[in-house]
Amino acid sequence: MILKAFNERVDSLFELRTNLRAAALDLFSQEFSYSTGYFATILNGCLFAPSLLTFWFVNGLIDFSTAITIGAVATPAGLQIRLLAYVLLIPTFFLLRVGIHLLHPTHRRQILTGSCPNARLLSLDWFSMGILATGLPLALQDFGPWLGMNIAFLLGLFVLPRPLSARRARLVRLTAVVLGVALFLYAKYGQAMIVLPPPQVVLGPIATFALGDRATEWLLRLVNSLLFGPLVVGTFGVFMNHVLTRPELTEIPLLHHTLPRRDPNSVVVTSAALGTMFYLLVVLAATGHAVLVP
């Protein structure tokens, strides 16, 4: 009798486990359906999108390699803080984007009915720029290589191609991009290349012109200040938004795949300013120090 009762109790527990498992699987399948479920609405391109994970990895490699190449990272500690910020970048952007949409009455109703708001309020491209832009004053201290590269870009992208045919103009623009980058690298790092003559001999003042330490420190404090940094980076983002999306650049083969699309200025300013504020708060949390005004 005791054995029979024990077997019945085991059978009932097994049946309960089976029912719970079936119910959980049914709810899980509904939630991940492409047509129903709030969580699916968020993940299937509405607020998050798997493409953000691709952006996280690819753009992270580009940003870190660029920061190291141009000298926007001065110390290993600075690199570690940027790495921490980039680890937190996607979760922070995701929460901000979800929060903004859920606070908007119309967007909230759309999401809760399973549809996506047709609005672009934040851009991850410009949000992530805040991490890199805060280190630009360090890179700009050696101003000569930047000057030479931008002169090459100005002439090769906007001036020389004007009287040429479309095919030759694209070739000139592509050549200008390659030469401009090569000029920058040679002017900045040519001193270490034994096989090449010193850049001071070939390029003259372009390779040697540099900003003073006081000017660099002031610019660095300006961009990394909580009150002015987001505004400065947001303004810089609007400028780059119009420059990088010009047809002279977007029509160059291969290059247009690496360029951002032109966004409304309000989206660029908001995203860049929030990205800068996010990075500065990461610095504050990691170091306990912050610059309020330059």
Image (cartoon, helix red, strand yellow):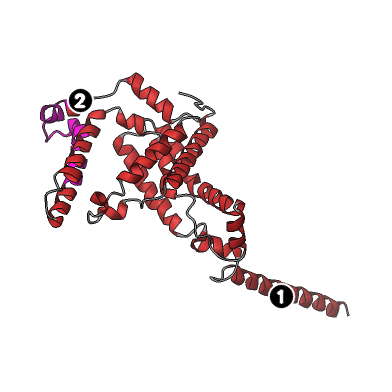
Q: Is residue 293 left or right of residue 238?
A: right
Identify the residue position indicated by label 1 in the image.
Answer: 19
Viewer-closest of 13 and 168: 168
Horizontal side of residue 30 vs 44, given as left or right: right
Residue at position x 59%, y 70% in the image: 36
185 part of magenta stretch: yes
Q: Which secondary structure lies at badge 1?
A: helix
Q: Which of these two is toward me, 71 or 124?
A: 124
Query: In this view of the protein, can residue 84 be seen by the observer?
Result: no
Against 181, residue 188 (above or below) is above
The residue carrying pointer 2 sits among few (fewer than 14), some (14 to 19) or many (20 or more) residues within 10 Å by Cα, namely some
- CB under 8 Å between callouts 1 and 2? no
Which amino acid, mark 2?
A: Thr
| Residue 194 visible in the picture | yes
Q: Position of residue 147 (x, y in %)?
A: 22, 32
- Of residues 205 and 154, the one drawn nearer to the viewer in this rendering: 154
Write down the residue under mark 2: 208
The answer to whether 61 is drawn above or below residue 32 in the figure is: above
What span is in magenta?
176-205
Residue at horizontal 75%, vertical 73%?
16
**Which of the image's four quarters has the C terminus?**
top left
Amino acid under disc 1: Asn
| Quadrant position of residue 214 | top left
Report the residue that reaches farthest toward the front: 163
Disc with the residue nearer the chain's start (1 vs 2) = 1
